[in-house]
Image: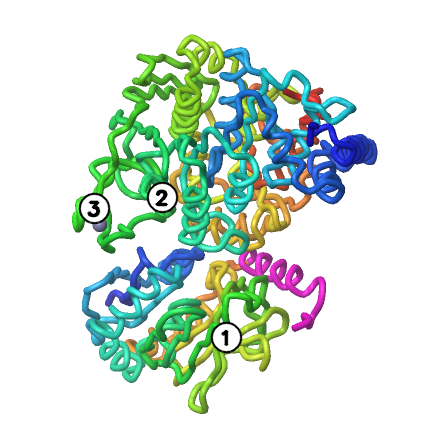
């Protein structure tokens, strides 16, 4: 008797599918979370039962920044390797979003289509990891990084690390854990792992910055309390760290970026040394933080024993998630939208923008909805000062536009910041004020990104996101 | 003669949770625009505080783990100097965790009670892990106007007879969510508050109040030139609007 195709499951799947259609028709968005909620109510435990049918098991990807990009890279690599991914690509990364995407992969009888070829690739919210790990028995769990993010929602960085440790301690011993060796807060999770661990790292010190940023969080050794010392800092508290007190240090990496090529307006080029040999990748992404996302994705592929050629082919087919880091032409201007929602993320975005050529037309959108974090004080930990002397256009928008404008004023970036709280009006204004042929950088927080991408989809004739992928 | 002020920033690396750096940026800029040089010294664990050397002292907030280390270091290396400085009129601003540690004690949800420095006649009690955390936008009444910010604290702070509240809550929770008080003031020169956001950039009146107090003590009667605060006032007004939009008095 199959539990998956039992009557209760079939009812749940049907109800959930109906909810998805309804949600889409009513214009609530991609219909990404509602079906999961419906299914949970009708048949609790459905996600676990469906996940158990995934022929190749599943991969969980979590961390403060880079989850979406990493998961999408894994998805492309998996496709190149012949898997049929089940992937919560809309970024709905709570349990209900994962349930919804498993349901989407079923037929009318509640059976997974082509179960033997299926690999689950799930981006998981930091706080949801224990629940997801317990329900889905993942083959691989990958961590990107750990930074302060929406303290009003997740609590302190220490509490997030404690939640992760709990999740890791409960994993089956066969689960491979993929860790960022250069982030001391992530690397030290290795003590909590029961099974195999793969570390990834950047060894190319040519991309190091001069000094540690204000967005550094893990600065003190949890074992002895000493301040870490760095022979190279890449961003935030990520780099070649060691503790002068107890000798803990960045572990040796299994997957390593020996060269990171970042040139203005050119794809990111990576030379990776991996257990499956040397790999050279070229990705349509900018910024060192994306080198780390690529490393995390390649490490997941290595853990899944994906052959090197498939990694190469998959990475080559990669395009960034719509609205997260994407270039598109709207009314003769190249609009480059980059999601940033915490100090470490926005610092990396600003660093990447300042490294590009040409005048910088900038629009920052700051919202304070629950999904953005209600507290906007984090913008004072961002080093906007690095844009000084570079801005041709500087606009602040969103519900907290005035807060953002004030922060920009303090950064002494040439142009006096303009304020337009309304997203649509601000985008219109930014496009009108950006000379034709020039580039407009748009950096929204999460809910602002949803609005921006809807508008750009309309003006640039891009399909809405749930039709993508 | 050059006008200069010296500020001691206590534990900028450890106590920097909610954009506390914005407060220093604000003081520096508002001094600079009046031709006043603000020199900032960063004092970390183990560094001693020379009370006579400073005009202003600032301490921000931190995570629990860091807060324990800071509490011990404060008592060991800085408590006496802080008392002396405040008695001599040095201007002190303590935000969130820093405010809690400068009270008499902090009793956490679990673990040992932390002894405070006792600058403020106040104590803080965390009512336990299941108690509601006070999170949200805050507006308080202060000196005939308002102060705005964001609060995020589990501890409830109560004031003793020799402390005055800094302000009265209009929207939000303040010290303890009950008595309508927010923050604490000792004498004319020591201020504690739960408001971050950052606090000073959006509250230029408070920033100038601190600067004036510090200047007076060193240079006698002063008048600060007015600055173009259009953007500051707009951000302040927007924060008031957002915090008071839903309900003036929240359910407790
Ligand atoms: Zn150590």
Residue numbers of the magenta segment: B230-252
Front-most of residues A148 and A442: A148
Secondary structure beneath dot 1 equals: strand
Residue tagged by mark 3?
A243
Residue corresponding to mark 2: A192
Identity of the residue furthest to the bottom in this view: B161
B130 part of magenta stretch: no
Quadrant of res A390: top left
Q: Where residue B48 sits in the image (x, y, percent)? A: 19, 69
Residue A120: horizontal and vertical position, in percent?
56, 26
Disc 3: which chain?
A
User: Which SS does the magenta portion mostly show?
Assistant: helix
Question: Do we see residue A311 in this rendering?
Answer: yes
Of the pair B18 and A29, the residue shown nearer to us: A29
For the residue carrying disc 1, how many other residues have a C-alpha within 10 Å: few (<14), some (14-19), or many (20+)?
A: many
| A306 with respect to A152 (left or right) | left
Q: Marks 2 and 3: which is nearer the front?
A: 2
- Quadrant where the N terminus of chain A sits is top right
Q: Could you tell whether A63 is left or right of B114 in the image?
A: right
Q: Residue at x 39, y 59 (%)?
A: B63
Name the residue rendered at 31%, 78% in the picture.
Answer: B117
Q: Quadrant of the C terminus of chain A?
A: top right
Label 3: how many Cα within 10 Å (few below 14, some 14–19, many 20+): many
The residue carrying mark 1 is: B156
Q: Same chain for labels 2 and 1? Say yes or no.
A: no
């Amino acid at each position: 008797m199959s539990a998956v195709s039992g009557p209760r499951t079939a009812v749940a799947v049907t109800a959930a599918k109906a909810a998805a259609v309804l949600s889409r028709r009513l214009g609530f968005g991609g219909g990404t979370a509602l079906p999961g909620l419906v299914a949970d109510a009708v048949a609790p435990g459905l996600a676990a039962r469906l996940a158990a049918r995934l022929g190749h098991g599943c991969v969980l990807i979590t961390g403060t920044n880079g989850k979406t990009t990493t998961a999408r890279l894994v998805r492309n690599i998996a496709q190149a390797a012949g898997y049929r991914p089940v992937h919560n690509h809309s970024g709905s990364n709570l349990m209900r979003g994962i349930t919804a995407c498993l349901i989407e992969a079923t037929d009318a009888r509640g059976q997974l289509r082509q179960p033997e070829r299926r690999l689950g690739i799930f981006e998981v919210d930091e706080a949801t990891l224990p629940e997801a790990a317990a329900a889905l028995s993942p083959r691989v769990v990958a961590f990107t990084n750990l930074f302060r993010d929406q303290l009003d929602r997740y609590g302190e960085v220490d509490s997030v690390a404690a939640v992760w440790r709990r999740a890791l301690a409960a994993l089956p011993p066969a689960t491979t854990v993929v860790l960022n060796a250069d982030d001391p807060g992530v690397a030290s999770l290795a003590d909590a792992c029961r099974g195999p661990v793969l570390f990834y790292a950047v060894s190319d010190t040519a991309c190091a910055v001069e000094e540690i940023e204000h967005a550094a969080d893990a600065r003190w050794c949890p074992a002895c309390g000493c301040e870490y010392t760095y022979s190279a800092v890449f961003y935030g508290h990520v780099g070649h760290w060691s503790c002068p007190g107890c000798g803990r240090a960045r572990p040796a990496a299994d997957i390593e970026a020996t060269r990171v090529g970042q040139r203005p307006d050119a794809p990111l080029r990576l030379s990776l040394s991996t257990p499956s040999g040397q790999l050279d990748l070229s990705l349509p992404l900018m910024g060192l933080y994306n080198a780390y996302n690529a490393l995390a994705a390649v490490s997941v592929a290595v853990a899944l024993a994906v052959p090197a050629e498939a990694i190469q082919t998959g990475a080559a087919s990669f395009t960034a998630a719509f609205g997260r880091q994407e270039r598109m032409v709207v009314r003769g201007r190249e609009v480059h939208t980059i999601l940033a929602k915490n100090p470490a993320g926005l610092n990396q975005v600003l660093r990447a923008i300042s490294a590009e050529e040409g005048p910088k037309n900038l629009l920052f959108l700051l919202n304070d909805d629950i999904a953005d974090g209600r507290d906007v004080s984090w913008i004072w930990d961002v080093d906007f000062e690095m844009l000084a002397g570079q801005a041709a256009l500087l606009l602040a928008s969103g519900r907290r536009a005035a807060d953002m404008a004030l922060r920009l004023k303090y950064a002494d970036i040439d142009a006096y910041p303009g304020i337009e709280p309304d997203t649509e009006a601000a985008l219109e204004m930014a496009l009108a004020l950006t000379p034709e042929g020039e580039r407009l950088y748009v950096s929204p927080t999460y809910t602002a990104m949803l609005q921006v991408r809807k508008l750009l989809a309309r003006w640039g004739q891009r399909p809405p996101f749930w039709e993508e992928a | 003669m050059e006008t200069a002020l010296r500020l001691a920033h206590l534990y900028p690396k450890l106590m920097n949770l909610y954009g506390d750096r914005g407060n220093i940026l604000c003081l520096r800029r508002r001094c600079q625009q009046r031709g006043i040089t603000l020199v900032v010294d960063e004092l970390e664990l183990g560094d001693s505080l020379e009370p006579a050397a400073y005009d202003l002292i600032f301490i921000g907030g931190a995570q629990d783990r860091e807060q324990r280390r800071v509490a011990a270091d404060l008592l060991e290396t800085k408590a006496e100097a802080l008392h002396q400085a405040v008695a001599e009129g040095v201007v002190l601003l303590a935000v969130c965790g820093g405010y809690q540690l400068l009270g008499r004690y902090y009793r956490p949800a679990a673990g040992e009670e932390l002894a405070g420095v006792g600058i403020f006649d106040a104590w803080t009690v965390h009512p336990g892990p299941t108690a509601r955390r006070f999170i949200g936008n805050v507006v308080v009444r202060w000196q005939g106007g308002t102060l705005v910010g964001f609060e995020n604290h589990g501890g409830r702070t109560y004031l003793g007879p020799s402390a005055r509240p800094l302000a009265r809550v209009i929207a939000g929770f303040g010290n303890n969510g009950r008595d309508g008080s927010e923050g604490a003031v000792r004498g004319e020169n020591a201020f504690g508050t739960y408001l971050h956001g950052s606090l000073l950039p959006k509250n230029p009146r408070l920033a100038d109040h601190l600067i004036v107090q510090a200047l007076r003590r060193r240079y006698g009667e002063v008048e600060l030139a007015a600055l173009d605060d259009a953007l500051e006032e707009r951000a302040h007004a927007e924060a008031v609007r957002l915090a008071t939009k839903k309900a003036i008095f929240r359910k407790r």
